[in-house]
Image (cartoon, coloured by chain):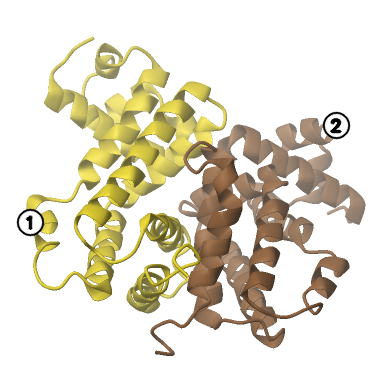
Chain colours: A yellow, B brown
Amino acid sequence: MRQNPARRAALLDAAIEVLARDGSRGLTFRAVDGAAKVPNGTASNYFANRDDLLTQVGGRVYERLRPDESTVADVSKGPRDRSKVAALMRDLVERISAFPTGFLALLELRLESTRRPALREVLTRQIREDLDGNIDFHLKSGLPGDATGVVLLYLGLNWLILDRLSLPDVIPEAEIPALVDELVERVLGPGLAES
Amino acid sequence: MRQNPARRAALLDAAIEVLARDGSRGLTFRAVDGAAKVPNGTASNYFANRDDLLTQVGGRVYERLRPDESTVADVSKGPRDRSKVAALMRDLVERISAFPTGFLALLELRLESTRRPALREVLTRQIREDLDGNIDFHLKSGLPGDATGVVLLYLGLNWLILDRLSLPDVIPEAEIPALVDELVERVLGPGLAES
């Protein structure tokens, strides 16, 4: 397998676009080569087979969604209250929404994983690690709310983004920021566990 | 177009199974005929074209998920408090999870709708009507919580079901009932709008 990291990343980026545009059934080495504008046969030099390609796409989406250093540094500025979390979550929704093909490609992978146990295992690990990382970061930052609250944010925000990217007229665009604020306000308040 | 309602429903049920199994790209009239175990050419007598078939599948999924009369009648028994809502929501999660191909077919339709404006319009209307129906039913039943709370339940429960059906090890099965209870307890409590 070839190892040029920039070329590999470019091929994975092309695979993301192909998945979002044509679905998992449209994802062939030839389609990836075409989308990456490289000679036919290039993708097959970088990935052992289609499964190898599929399992690497999820990691690339997460890599591209990672917050930059200034976003992380902002967390420790000012009071760490629920309105701080709401601002962070509104930014997160915008960051994910600004990369719609990444979110849609991950969904295609989820659906494909119901048919491919190896892919399911890799995706489960990536998503659970990301969720655990969010819980850990949230609690260590001294932000309000508990681990359950972070899981409830993960659930609600993901479907909000899915609606926005797949059926944008179900929840009107203008209502999204206030809905994020309400979700944060409510799920990070006291729950059953503490009452 | 042929109009035998039972035959039409059976063809739509077969289309749901094909969508969940093979994705939207696998949905052809021939595949539907095969899954419905009817002679080739039958589906094409019931649906004008593939778009017509796709736009009718969503309606059929919702039809099959409609609660029965006893479930609806149960709402008015006993105190209408948050634990009543939690029990209803746990039942809802089980009802939808028990028809996994319906949920996965709807997701395939969502992804396909990013490429088909006519399908997007039909799906948006179905999903928004269902959500408005839930809000209306909730408020008229005298159950606790506001319209925003019902929208937040819709968001959180849908992604919980998606995780359960596509990547069942992200949220352990045993944690699901307590997570539903926490979501209900928190989002139906007082939010920003009332505070």
As drawn, B137 above or below A70: below
The disc numbered 2 marks a residue on which chain? B
Look at the numbered discs 2 and 1 and tell me whether their residues touch, using CB distance below 8 Å: no
Q: Secondary structure at mark 2?
A: loop
Q: Are marks 2 and 1 on the same chain?
A: no
Question: Which residue lies most toward the bottom here?
Answer: B194
Q: Secondary structure at mark 1?
A: helix
Residue B118 visible: no
Quarter the N terminus of chain A occupies: top left
Q: CA distance from mark 2 to mark 1?
A: 59 Å
Residue A173: % across, % down: 37, 73
Q: Residue at x 75, y 37 (%)?
A: B32
Residue bearing the label numbered 2: B37
Give the residue type at disc 1: Ser
Q: Residue at x 51, y 32 (%)?
A: A112
Neighbour class for label 1 at 10 Å: few (<14), some, many (≥20)?
few
Q: Residue at x 28, y 44 (%)?
A: A133
Give the residue type at disc 2: Lys
Residue bearing the label numbered 1: A70
Q: Could you say which is closer to the camera, residue B175 or residue B53?
A: B175
Residue A43 visible: yes
Q: Could you say which is closer to the camera, residue B56 or residue B108?
A: B108
Residue B166: % across, % down: 54, 39
The disc numbered 1 marks a residue on which chain? A
Q: Could you say which is closer to the camera, residue B26 or residue A118?
A: A118
